Image (cartoon, rainbow, N blue to C red):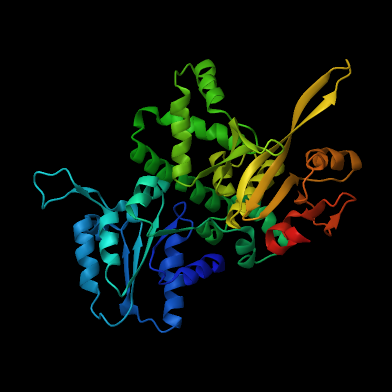
Amino acid sequence: MIERKRYLDKLIRKKENGLIKVITGIRRCGKSFLLFNIYHSYLNSIGVKDEQIIELALDDDANIMYRNPLELGKYIRSMIVDTNKKHYVFLDEIQKVATIKNPYLEDSAEKIGFVDVLLGIMKIKNVDIYVTGSNSKMLSSDILTEFRGRGDEIRVNPLSFAEFYNAYEGDKREAWREYFTYGGMPLVTAQKTHADKSKYLQDLFDKIYLDDIIARNNINKNKSVLEDALNVVSSSIGSLTSPHNLANTFSSKKNIKIDEETVMKYLDSFIDAFILYKAQRYDVKGRKYIGSPLKYYFSDIGLRNARLNFRQLEENHIMENIIYNELLIREFNVDVGVVEYNYRAEDGKSKRTQLEVDFVANRASQRYYIQSALSVGNEDKRLQETNSLNRIDDSFKKIVVVKDDIIPWHDEKGILYIGVERFLLDENAMNL
């Protein structure tokens, strides 16, 4: 069993806090296993009996009747048999519950959905509720408003490199190559061959993710455009991407007329399904956000590689994506940094240019500037990679993460150089 200690600890901290624990993340990242196996076992270990744990997988067709919110509410109440003991309600894939017209108000347009059921169950004093969901629409601002501040999100990600390595039978270099290629979807670790791993990841895309997105957003007519947009983003992780330019590309190269807003909608549908993340650009010196273009990253690099049939395994971009995901797992807010400065051109005129910092990572009062580089093996390369960092004049930590397994060291300006494996395996290494 792969240990998911970070998420188990969060569930333990939030246990019986009076809020509905909403566990979100991409499908097949391990939310159900976390709740039904790992957390269930923990509750058993502290004396909670199985009959006190009410579990329902709403994506199972055997439970299809409970996608009706009224039937769901009746079922949960029927299972709370001992009012003197705490009951823990686990509902998997809560977004499957339909929103229906209130059958008791014939002349009213009032609707009933899972939010109404959960708020009603919460009023039972001996109940602690946990739900999972696989798209961010279930946590839209409207739904959070309806929860009246009673929802508490726990985002679950595919396996981090540390989680993957702890379950891997081999050395760190072999683990890195495996993770770099196939990512961290938990069930991919059970596959033995490249053919099995690639088929599993490609099937996730073709038979689950794409079908979900197309059905949810009603975009059957432009399925090819949706997939083309995803392919472009898959090929350009770590590069600036503009929906406007994508729309122009469709027009010029494919003779498909599609507006920028539609392209943005399609990309956002992958974000809603937790397949993609987008990173905004942040002007470090001007302390302001910059609009389009921005960067897109995959929540799991194996899915990205499978999408491209493992043809584009550029280690620099993939390593950057993995570092971005790790910072999110560590609960940083992550932006792409922009450092502007003036210089004197050969013609004697003053010109302004921009340099990029791969990541500006913020968490509470902490800030880190992080550059991802395959190597800084010679002085020219090192100065190139640190040019943007050296032009930031605040006192926050600056880090260069390299592919090589090096002993961490600092240069004369205090920049930390560290190998990617040490960076990913030791959270405290950021503060060396």
Percent across and percent down for residue 292 are 58, 29
Relative to residue 162, is residue 368 depicted above or below?
above
Percent across and percent down for residue 252 are 53, 16
Q: Is residue 217 left or right of residue 77?
A: right
Q: Quadrant of residue 59?
A: bottom left
Percent across and percent down for residue 234 are 57, 37
Relative to residue 269, is residue 300 depicted above or below?
below
Q: Is residue 47 left or right of residue 161?
A: left
How many discs appear? 0
Q: Residue furthest left?
A: 106
Report the residue at 87% width, 49% height from top: 413
Relative to residue 232, is residue 51 depicted above or below?
below
Q: Is residue 431 left or right of residue 229?
A: right
The residue nearer to you, when weighing 375 against 379, is 379
For the question of whether residue 208 can be seen, the reply is no
Relative to residue 340, is residue 399 depicted above or below?
below
The residue nearer to you, when weighing 393 against 290, is 393
The residue nearer to you, when weighing 422 against 395, is 395
Report the residue at 84% width, 45% height from top: 376
Q: Is residue 327 left or right of residue 251?
A: right
Percent across and percent down for residue 354 are 74, 30
For the question of whether residue 102 can be seen, the reply is yes
Q: Quadrant of residue 356?
A: top right
Quadrant where the image shows the C terminus: bottom right
